[in-house]
Amino acid sequence: MLQTNSIEDFWNAFYFSAQTFSTVGFGSYHPDNNLTNIVSVLEMLVGMMYLALAAGLLFARFSRPVSKIIYSNKLLVAPYKNGKGLMFRLANAKNNLLLNVTIRVFLTMKVEIQGRMERKFFQLPLEMNHIDFLALSWTVVHPLDEKSPLYGMKPRDLKASDA
């Protein structure tokens, strides 16, 4: 490396560092003793690790599968355990495996509160709201028991409450 005692020392070191870090090559700059050789080798290793880390992060960011869930537009009330259950099916529309799948089902309907109609939201408890992997389809079941906001309601009641 060139030896000067001016501001050029900084710029020479900067250019040498940039060439080493980018692994482009030294051009007219080269290490001239053991210490600068050790520093340049360490800087080359850091540069390669940085490049590998950046490439890995970019790959991980853009290679994630995008889930496409399809679900039935029909609900089924069917016998379930000692009562009835509200059921629908969903499936993964893509040819990949979804891991750690969680579902939450909400019901919205108008209810009368103090003489006026208000829209309320209810999270429906499910038989199972989590599966480890979704390979094919999943039948989601909401038990229609005393805890359910749908308990005792008929289809005409659901229509009237705009559920």
Image (spheres, grey):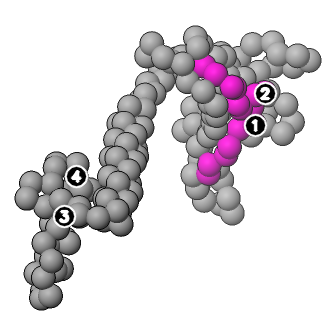
Q: State if disc 3 and disc 1 touch (CB < 8 Å).
A: no
Per the rendered image, the range of residues in magenta is: 120-134
Name the amino acid type tagged 1: Pro
Q: Position of residue 38 (x, y in %)?
A: 37, 60
Of the two numbered discs 3 and 4 on the same chain, state the one appearing first in sequence: 3
Is any part of residue 8 visible from this angle? yes
Q: Residues within 10 Å of mark 3 (few under 14, many from 20)?
A: many
Q: In what element is the residue under mark 1?
A: loop
Numbered tag placed on residue 22 in the rendering: 4
Residue 123 forms part of the magenta stretch: yes
Image quarter (top left, top right, bottom left or bottom right) of the N terminus: bottom left
Please name whichever residue, 2 or 84, is drawn nearer the observer in this view of the structure.
2
Are the residues tagged 2 and 1 within 8 Å (C-beta)? no
Mark 2, residue position: 127
Identify the mark at residue 149; answer none if there is no mark.
none
Nearer the viewer's eye, disc 4 or disc 1?
Answer: 4
The residue labelled by disc 1 is: 125
Which is closer to the viewer, label 1 or label 3? 3
Mark nearer the N terminus (4 vs 1): 4
The quadrant of the image that shows the C terminus is top right
Q: Quadrant of residue 105?
A: top right
Q: Is residue 35 above or below residue 160?
A: below
Judging depth in this view, the residue of 123 and 7 nearest the camera is: 7
Residue 89 can be seen in this image: no
Q: Nearer the viewer, mark 3 or mark 4?
A: 3
Q: CA distance from mark 2 to mark 3?
A: 65 Å
Q: CA distance from mark 1 to mark 3?
A: 64 Å
